[in-house]
């Protein structure tokens, strides 16, 4: 059974994951209209993953005797000055989410809620992966700079980053 405090904290995280999904959906749209289909596909996948993170939390809250709240979301940024700026925002956002997960873990320990603590370990690992992926992408973007040819190749290769991350997430 969840305490009111934990339920509230988990519901706040549900909102953050929903907003993450919207933020990345807006990035996907911007990349798509700019003609970078690889980047757009990558961002659509990220958006879906964030929705999955949200759903996993929703199920947990409802199964543990709480009531998952579906709330109004903040409108995401829909345009960017460059792809570099877009990926910087993605990286910063993942760091923000990691901090939020860490805070949740802290609260679960304070409340001695070991079931929630155990559940949250998946999110801790996921954030390590997502931050690493965002950093890898940012490093590549910084190498490319303003080179159009480099951006073309990056757009082609980002699908590979997508595939390799997906396959490390689902080892079968
Ligand atoms: Fe997430
Ligand atoms: Fe994420």
Image (cartoon, rainbow, N blue to C red):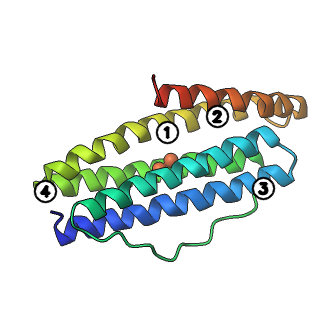
Distance (Cα) linking label 3 and label 4: 42 Å
- Quarter of the rendering occupied by the C terminus: top left
Most distant residue in the left direction: 112
Q: Is mark 2 within 8 Å of ligand 2?
A: no
Q: In front: 62, or 32?
A: 62
Whether the residues at callouts 2 and 3 have beta carbons within 8 Å, the answer is no
Numbered label attached to residue 18: none
Residue corresponding to mark 4: 110
Where disc 1 sits, the SS reads helix
- Quarter of the rendering occupied by the N terminus: bottom left
From this view, report whether residue 77 is shown above or below residue 143. Answer: below
Q: Nearer the viewer, mark 2 or mark 3?
A: 3
Residue corresponding to mark 2: 137
Q: Earlier in the sequence, mark 1 or mark 3?
A: 3
Seen in the image, is 15 located left or right of residue 27? Answer: left
Distance (Cα) linking label 4 and label 1: 26 Å
Residue corresponding to mark 3: 30
Q: Residue at x 70, y 54 (%)?
A: 27
Distance (Cα) linking label 2 and label 4: 36 Å
Whether the residues at callouts 3 and 4 have beta carbons within 8 Å, the answer is no
Q: Is residue 138 visible?
A: yes
Q: Earlier in the sequence, mark 2 or mark 1?
A: 1
Distance (Cα) linking label 2 and label 3: 17 Å
Q: Is residue 81 visible?
A: no
């Amino acid at each position: 059974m969840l305490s009111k405090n934990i339920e509230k904290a988990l519901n706040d995280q549900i909102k953050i994951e929903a907003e993450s999904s919207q933020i990345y959906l807006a990035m996907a749209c911007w990349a798509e209209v700019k003609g970078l289909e690889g980047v757009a596909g990558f961002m659509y996948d990220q958006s879906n993953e964030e929705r999955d993170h949200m759903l996993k939390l929703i199920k947990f809250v409802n199964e543990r005797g709480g009531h998952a709240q579906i709330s109004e979301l903040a409108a995401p940024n829909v345009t960017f000055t460059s792809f570099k700026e877009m990926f910087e925002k993605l990286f910063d956002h993942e760091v923000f989410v990691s901090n939020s997960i860490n805070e949740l873990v802290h609260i679960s320990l304070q409340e001695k809620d070991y079931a929630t603590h155990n559940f949250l370990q998946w999110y801790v690992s996921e954030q390590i992966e997502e931050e690493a992926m965002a950093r890898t992408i940012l490093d590549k973007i910084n190498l490319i700079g303003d080179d159009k040819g480099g951006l073309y190749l990056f757009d082609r290769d980002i699908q590979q980053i997508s595939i390799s991350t997906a396959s490390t997430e689902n080892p079968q």
